[in-house]
Image: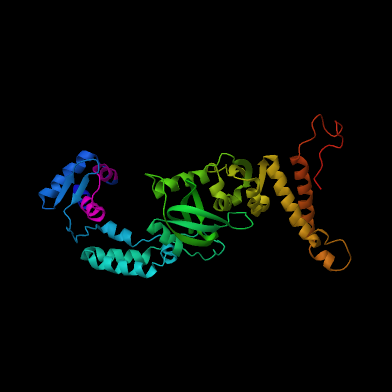
Amino acid sequence: MKSDRLLSLLLLLQTRGLVPATELAERLEVSVRTIYRDVEALSASGVPVYAERGRHGGITLLPGFRTDVTGLTADESRALFVLAAQGAHAALGLDRALGSALRKVMAALPEPHRPAAELTSRRILVDPDRWMRTPRPAVDLDVLDRAVLADRRVRLQYRSGGAPAPKTYTVDPYGLVVKAGVWYLVADRDAEPRLFRADRVHRAELLDDPVRRRDGIELADVWEVLRRRVETRPDEILVRARVHRERLDRFVRLHGDRLTAAPERSDPDEEWTEVELAFHRAGDARPLLAMGGSLEVLDPPEIRTLLARAAAEIVALYPEARDADAGAGPEAQVEPRARTRATALQEAITEAITEAIPEPRGGGADGPGGGGARPPS
């Protein structure tokens, strides 16, 4: 609606000061011509707004002009009380400030909107953490927060994933991002965009030097580049597998983020559904073992071999199940099923390893090299 757009334009100018007409048009998703028409409408209604010409010109309000009108609609009022990341406020030390701000907003709301806003805050709760996540280490964002707000460089002692010890970097921060409850510092290192997990920062030192960002680049721009870099790696390993129909829902909950496409629900008479997953590294496929016998990797052979070896290591840890019937006495007969399952699993592992390793070039067991394929030692 035009009235909502006029109010949004007024509040933007009141907050930002001098703003180019092109930026206002982009923010409000209208044309530049519409912005100038809206400026004329505001001026006609008594708002002291005017345009400054020139290369560094734009639309601005008369200095000192303020309005106390909130102009919040019912849905906007409710939206303010659905706060998705309460943990983010706590990490920044803003929990009390948030509560105070919400009380002030509630007091400023039009009387008809207050009951709906209050009810929303009591009936809607958003928890950004995933189920069964391991406890995260404490994160001290104080220095990082001050650096991004003061536009200062930062010296980090940072340990990359898999690195044995931290290294020292001097970075130019763009801002902080919290994704799925994990905080990241988005910064340039040697004029290249980098992502630093806050819980891997051993020490952060705020420097006196002003930040050296690339011209015209904002936090959202850098984050988009880094996000795409993480999500679309060219060296992904595609794994084809089949999942038992009864465990398909659990498989999607555990590994849905790895699927290249939603699995097709098979015919009720079919026991198995084929799926395709993408992994950055072969070792990332190990969690598939959690599905037990409800999932079988069909391809590629190296992933079958990796899982078979991992399963063999597990069986080796429980020899008592494999050898439960080896001796005399009541204990030997207590768990015959465990022995049968362990023996069957060991046989399946040996068979899987044998099938997964290609035969030597030039023939089978009787070809050059002799002996054929055999399980690795």
Q: Is residue 180 visible?
A: no
State whether residue 38 is above or below residue 111.
above
Q: Is residue 73 left or right of residue 348?
A: left
Judging depth in this view, the residue of 93 and 280 nearest the camera is 93
Q: Is residue 338 left or right of residue 205?
A: right
Q: What secondary structure characterizes most of the magenta part?
A: helix
Quarter of the image for residue 77 reads bottom left
Quarter of the image for residue 163 reads bottom right
Furthest toward the front, the residue is 208
Q: Is residue 374 left or right of residue 139?
A: right
Kindly identify the residue that appears in the image at 56 percent across and 39 percent down.
234
State whether residue 204 is above or below residue 270.
below
State whether residue 102 is above or below residue 48.
below
Query: Can you give x and y, in whole percent of width and height, for residue 183 in the image?
Result: 48, 58
Query: Can you give x and y, in whole percent of width and height, for residue 129 in the image?
Result: 49, 60
The image's colouring method is: rainbow
Query: Can you give x and y, in whole percent of width and height, for residue 338 in the image?
Result: 77, 60
Q: Is residue 328 left or right of residue 122?
A: right
Q: How many numbered marks appear? A: 0
Q: Which residues are magenta?
A: 8-26
User: Is 118 in the magenta?
Assistant: no
Furthest toward the right, the residue is 328
State whether residue 27 is above or below residue 203.
above
Furthest toward the top, the residue is 362
Kindly identify the residue that appears in the image at 27 percent across and 68 percent down.
104
Q: Is residue 77 visible?
A: yes
Query: Can you give x and y, in whole percent of width and height, for residue 204 in the image?
Result: 50, 61
